[in-house]
Amino acid sequence: MLHYYPTISTLGINYKIRITDFYNTANSQNTSPFTVSSATYTGNLKVSLDWDHSYEPPQSVPVAGIAADGVARIYLNLSKINNSIGPNILSVSVVLSDLLNGSSPSKLGRVKKALQTTSYSLEANGIQSITDVDNTPNKNNYNFWYVAPDDFCGADPNDLKNSYRFVNATFTVNYDNSLNEVFIKKILIVRPPLALVHGLASSPSAWNKFTFTSPNGLKVQFLSSYNYLFKQVDAIPILPDGHFNNNAFGIVVPSSSQPIMNTLQGVILKMRDKGYAVNKVDYVGHSMVET
């Protein structure tokens, strides 16, 4: 994974950065055009990643990252470290990038100025933009929605074998003294959790032989794939002789015979307890549960 932070001393517009393969110069990628403007550095800005209200936020667990499920969302909260220091803020803008995936919302995610931050909201549904701006001056907190990418795998071929990648949220803060400041917050992107459900007359142990080849050539169980591919994998037990409808209902709706941690919601909760915002799972089943 490439991490490169160039320094450009001449102000101007329509700059691009080109990344070229040293061994195959025909293989290259260009960034989207960007502007280099005058900036200041106060050291007085911070950006936190905050839980939204899709689920009850896990107690004392900060947001570590977000799963690329297309619907999970968090707040990007920019504020001054000390409100009494420095010039007043006039506006804040944010744009997403990673030097590899251009301007694709499906790979980078989406952002929007957040108006509703205290309760569950559909405000971020349907947004398709990788940039937005809040022109309200002198706020204590500038909150933006960040909605997860649709796809974990982007333009980097290593995404196929990695368990994480990063997206940059670049904030430009405009002050009332005509200067601006740029602050980059890296957002950790991981795969959605994986739910494995066995079939008729079977058990969770059916998945013990479900393996993949790791980058170092080892065969690894998907159930043990933490830090290889997935941050959360669960083999959900169902009734081996149960009716299809009963088992299908059971992995969605918790009951006395199917506790919540043995449901799809349970897989999501375990992932969120690790600090990853997620609202959907990747589901793999065999036999009668594959549909």
Image (spheres, rainbow, N blue to C red):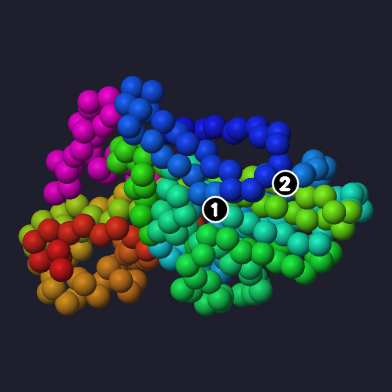
Residue that label 2 marks: 37
User: Which quarter shows the N terminus?
Assistant: top left
Task: Note whether residue 17 is visible.
Answer: yes
Rendered image: mark on residue 96: 1
- How far from the left and from the top, in percent, is residue 123? 55, 76
Q: CA distance from mark 1 to mark 2?
A: 18 Å
Q: Element type at marker 1? A: strand
18 relative to 139, above or below: above
Residue shown at the point (59%, 33%) measured from the top left: 5
Specify which label sits upstream in the sequence, 1 or 2: 2
Magenta segment includes 219: yes
Mark 2 burial class by Cα count in 10 Å: few <14, some 14-19, many 20+: some
Q: Element type at marker 2? A: loop
Task: Note whether residue 271 is visible.
Answer: no
- How far from the left and from the top, in percent, is residue 260? 37, 66
Residue with the most extreme right position? 84
Magenta segment includes 220: yes
